[in-house]
Image (cartoon, rainbow, N blue to C red):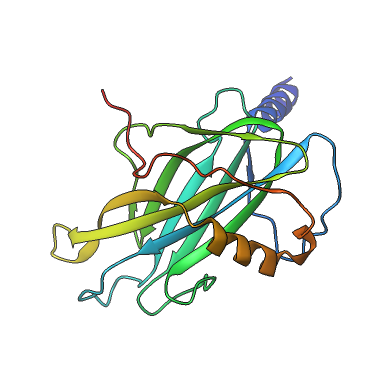
Amino acid sequence: MRIVIVMFLAILVSACETIKIKPIDQDYAFIEKPGVGYVFGTLTQTFVKKERSKIFDDTYISHIYIDEKVKGSNKSYRASVIGGENNIQNPDFPNENGFLFLFEIAVGTHQLDHWSAKEAYVTIMPNKSMVPLSFTITEGEILYLGNVHMDLGFGKNLIGAPVTSEVVPEIRHLFYRDKRLLLRKYKSLSNKKIINAPLKNKFWAQIEA
């Protein structure tokens, strides 16, 4: 009886778990599918040079999430950019630490709803819920969300070591730059309709109490 109960609970947890989807790889084979479209944009981050403690890694990671906070959804989408003063891992742009993301996503309404940033053992998250930024996907088309830019600010912790202390997320409209990068990375999409409808909030605000 105990084994049956354990197996039932494992199946229940697995059924309720949200599937976390990563951006499409550059060598992805695009196939026409009913009921799906695409969404793309870029994620960039900036950080200031500063005196570093030798015990901390010189790596900053910014994440954005789509449908992470949607009740009843069994899928969420995460894009990430990783970099540092001497550690640029996503060189999609020559002068910025940036990464282009592209997701295959079901038609209908979705939302960009959350962000986080990380450095070594420090994780920064909004202290309130973010205003959800909604967008609509049309079958077979590619929707441009914009450039989500994360400006990382720094302070010192209790022992005086410099750490990430604040993040200011900004949504910039850089469609033609980002479209060129999209078609350079995914050449098979050149015949797709690309919709320039970036999210409207310039500075991604938190929900007021």
Residue 131 is left or right of residue 76, and the answer is left
Residue at 59 percent across and 32 percent down: it is: 110
The image quadrant of residue 162 is bottom left
Residue at 59 percent across and 56 percent down: it is: 101
Residue at 61 percent across and 23 percent down: it is: 72
Percent position (x, y) of residue 3?
73, 27
Percent position (x, y) of residue 161?
18, 66
Residue that lies at the very extreme toward the bottom in this rendered image: 86
Percent position (x, y) of residue 179?
61, 60
Residue at 79 percent across and 56 percent down: it is: 191
Residue that lies at the very extreme toward the top in this rendered image: 1
Residue 27 is left or right of residue 206, and the answer is right
Viewer-nearest residue: 118 or 110: 110
Viewer-nearest residue: 188 or 73: 188
Residue 28, compared with residue 84, is above or below; it is: above
Report the number of numbered marks. Answer: 0
Residue 127 is left or right of residue 100, and the answer is left
Viewer-nearest residue: 11 or 20: 20
Residue 190, compared with residue 169, is above or below; it is: below
Percent position (x, y) of residue 182?
64, 62
Question: Image quadrant for the C terminus?
Answer: top left
Residue 19, compared with residue 164, is above or below; it is: above
Question: Image quadrant for the N terminus?
Answer: top right
Viewer-nearest residue: 7 or 205: 205
